[in-house]
Image (spheres, grey):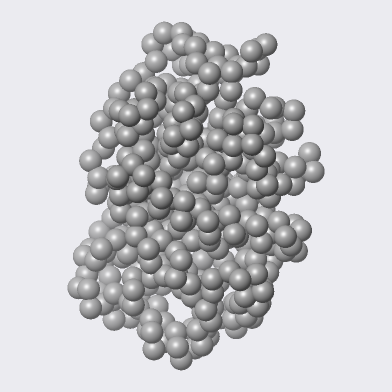
Amino acid sequence: MDLYSGLPYWIAKNPLYNYFNPLESDYNTDIVIIGSGITGALVAHELCTAGIKCTMIEKRSISTGSSTASTALLQYEIDTPLSELVKMIEEDLAVKAYESCLQSINDLEKVFKSIGLNPDFERVPSVYYATNHKGHKLIEKEYVIRTKYHLPVNYLSKKELNDKYGIKAPGALENNVSAQIDAYKAATHLIDYHIKNSDLDVFSHTEIITYQKTASGYELQTANYSKINCKYLIIAAGFEAGRFLPKQVMKLTSTYAIISQPVDEKFIWADKSLIWETKEPYLYIRTDKNRIIAGGEDEDFKDPVLRDKLLRRKVGILEKKIKKLFPKIPFKTEMAWCGTFSSTDDGLPYIGNWPGKDDMFYALGYGGNGITFSMVAAQMARNKLEGKKDSREEVFGFERMNI
């Protein structure tokens, strides 16, 4: 299935990673990672760094799935506000989920410093503004609980928000620990680095169509009838992981994004902060140098054709929202795209082993924090293979489904 349509900015900005290496014969290996997006790339990085030999399988060109459609905001906030998440799961686990995302932003920065390649990782503040009175009540609750657990947060009054950012809204929460990145460049940087430096085997244009359990692990069959035998399987294929899951754990969402023509720097708000709102589905905005990227207008996914038909109308709605928020910005859309992503009822990813499947690990970074969740998943996969206990298993594992 097409994961996106239109022209994602990252594909226009970056040269396509020119890698073509389909598997054409039977192959044996210890560990297989399925998926070459940012999740698979981070998993490969963690394993290769630990000296764990692994192989990556991708049915498309490298990293050209959902990662190319990501707007790549890096925040510790989860789609489900903390004040709501504590009603769904135990409070200490909810707080740990937020703390894990906060730590993962630092860890992502360290990953790219360690390989000497920067995929436009940039520290920027984040502004979470109240769209209306109901939203203002929400951010007041959020401020209280985040302050209680010493999470980085600052409250901005209506006047302070307008004076600093030019946003007319009842109030906002601000932090200075967020970041942004180019997810496509990040994934391809990591994969290329470890192909060259860690003997990472990567087979592109190789689709797994069936798999079966064996005495020593798994046998995978590709579309061209090659067989792959492995001892351990890591699923990092986003919502396309469905065929490897005993039951569906996510719901599919269509989301839309636009990027402006370059604008004069004088029109861009303070510190080029990430901006998002309390309304659902929420508008989210970031910059890339002097371009403005906006996304949102999410819809329940039905099929790619319907998703794509809505693109023109969604572009118009996003443009109107930006004009209302920042009336002085001469925003003109240069590129637009839409993509399909996955979300969960509690806004948390699913990371770990399905009960009873000890030799299959799922790294499914569902939700708006996909990249920070991917960093967590990569570390958890490494710890699992090294036999180390990871306390985050009780936060992000499948057990919370009461299987």
Q: Is residue 210 above or below residue 62?
A: above
Toward the viewer: 134 or 273? 273
Q: Is residue 143 above or below residue 295?
A: below
**From the viewer's perspective, is 325 left or right of 281?**
left
- Measuring 66% from the left and 61% from the top, which residue is drawn there? 95
Q: Is residue 318 visible?
A: no
- Measuring 22% from the left and 70% from the top, which residue is drawn there? 263
**From the viewer's perspective, is 356 left or right of 114?**
right
x and y, in percent, of residue 27 in the image? 46, 11
x and y, in percent, of residue 9 in the image? 30, 51
Q: Total of numbered circles in the picture? A: 0
Residue farthest toward the bottom in the current orientation of the protein? 159
**From the viewer's perspective, is 214 left or right of 227?**
right
x and y, in percent, of residue 198 in the image? 37, 27
Which quarter of the figure has residue 206? top left
- Measuring 46% from the left and 66% from the top, which residue is drawn there? 177
Toward the viewer: 95 or 65? 95
Q: Is residue 252 visible?
A: yes
**From the viewer's perspective, is 122 left or right of 246?**
left
